[in-house]
Amino acid sequence: MAAKSKVSYVCTECGAEATKWYGRCPACGAWNSMEELVQAPTAIGNSARSAATVAAQQITAIKPDEKQRYHTGMKELDRVLGGGIVRGGLMLIGGDPGIGKSTLLLQICAHLGETLRILYVSGEESEGQIKLRADRLGVASDNLYILCENDLDSVLQCVQENKPEVLIIDSIQTMNWSQVTSASGSVTQVRECTSAIMRVCKKLGIPAFIVGHVNKDGAIAGPKVMEHIVDCVLYFEGDRHSSYRLLRCVKNRYGSTNEIGVFEMCDKGLAEVENPSLMLLSGRPLNVSGSCVACAIEGTRPMLAEVQGLVSPTGFGNPRRMSTGFDYNRLSLILAVLEKRAGYFFSNLDTYVNVVGGLWLDEPAVDLPVALALISGLKDTAIPSGVLAFGEVGLTGEIRAVSNADLRIAEAARMGFKCAIVPHHNFKSVTKRADIQVIGVRTVREAYEVVRDAVVE
Ligand code: TYD
Ligand code: MG
């Protein structure tokens, strides 16, 4: 590698790199987002490597690290991580300010601190502030060390001296490495600091949580440059107005990326929500038009959620279409299918779809409940409250089979639902149950007719 430092430019919005500066990013079109990226000629922790130490190993002779997973004491977080923290793993936690990243990390210290030595580095809060929060959360452990520092060299020196068993960096944007001249939080700093932390942590086998702020588009600042360095990327999401928080995994080298964790922010910090269906359905209006319960699978877990559809006459001009928690284009497609294949007309009506609880449902199985909520809103006829539906809507108006039908029906029965409207192909193979009636349907029209006529006690 050349010893001379090389200059390139990187977009802070999308992470695209270019050899010269542009006023507008050629990749994503953002204005004034290109920043100078200086490739540092030397890096911490690299110097000790020499050719003589390199030796390839037979895969059969390598011991897996699986036993080295630490449990965080929060089942929801463990699940998202794929079973716990892996030794030497680097986990990036992103999310809006105030969503609860620092709270979550401080809370897990309570359990981890029983057996492991933890170093919590904060560049945002003072020791006193952290202590105040820790007292509130009931975190008191002699194994928890707090370091309020922005200088990365000092942090890494402290890590190398104290050899903690878990490292927490809150947040990477406040870290500053003196060898890089750019300001804290710039792409170059974030990238170099992350790589430096990674080298030290991998060498010492320390798992590290790194908090990353998100930019205005909701991506972690300096997104691509960080995501490929770390082992696991988690996003903490939630509506500002609701106390529920979802922890979603978008990259995981040690587990599935489909899992989500559900938390509720209480006055004593984050509480795990083990029964998300109950939470999502609480406060549901019964026997009103324009509402249908869906059963989606998030990861390996079935989850019931209410889908609402509102239909009202267009005031002027083009009808409005809006969707929250559901893909806008998918909504347009469902509306087109309903008009063309099922004879329900929305062309001079404004249509709004909302998934209650701040959840984002992108699974095809949610098509049918969305369609039913819209038809129910259009006809102003309520869907009985004990009925739920799932199924994919095809372009000819047919209802197509979805995966895990048994799991969804079992969850519906557990939550006290009496009738499930399912795709005909699923109906043929599902296990018959006494506590819930299952009805297979072939088309959207048939589904609505069945729902309308369903008698649920
Ligand atoms: P915080 O963890 O500081 O957010 P982040 O690190 O992601 O920026 O979360 C702070 C928010 O959480 C703040 O709005 C207050 C709220 N909160 C509670 O409601 N209860 C609590 O016990 C704590 C510690 C915080
Ligand atoms: Mg914080």
Image: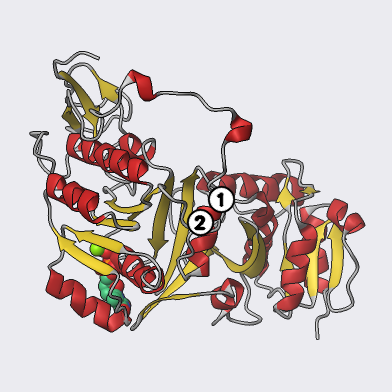
Residue at 53% x, 49% y is 327
Label 1–label 2 contact, CB within 8 A: yes
Horizontal side of residue 24 vs 178, given as left or right:
right
Location of the N terminus by quadrant is top left
**What x and y, as percent, mark residue 420?**
79, 68
x then y, percent, for residue 82:
55, 54
Residue 260 at least partly seen: no
Q: Provide residue 368's location: percent of width, then percent of height.
A: 70, 57
Q: Residue at x 28, y 24 (%)?
A: 17
- Note whether 249 is above or below 304 in the view shown: above
Which disc number belongs to residue 66? 1
User: Which label number is shown at residue 100?
Assistant: none
The image shows residue 149, relative to residue 222, as above or below, that is below
Q: As drawn, is 86 to the left or to the right of 124? A: right
Q: Nearer the viewer, residue 165 or 167?
A: 165
Residue 235, position as x, y percentages in the image: 40, 54
The disc labelled 1 sits on which kind of residue?
Glu
Badge 1 local density, few (<14 within 10 Å), some, or many (20+)?
few
Beta carbon at label 2 within 8 Å of ligand 1: no
> What's the distance in space between the residues labelled 1 and 2, CA to CA?
6 Å
Q: What residue type is labelled 2?
A: Arg
Residue farthest along the front direction in this orientation: 52
Q: Residue at x 14, y 19 (%)?
A: 5
Q: Which colour scheme is used?
A: secondary structure
- Of 8 and 45, which appears nearest the observer? 45
Front residue of 336/276: it is 276
Callout 2 secondary element: loop
Where is mark 2, residue-wise?
A: 69
Element under disc 1 = helix
Q: In the rendered view, would you say 86 is above or below 451?
A: above
Q: Quadrant of the C terminus?
A: bottom right
| Residue 229 visible here | yes
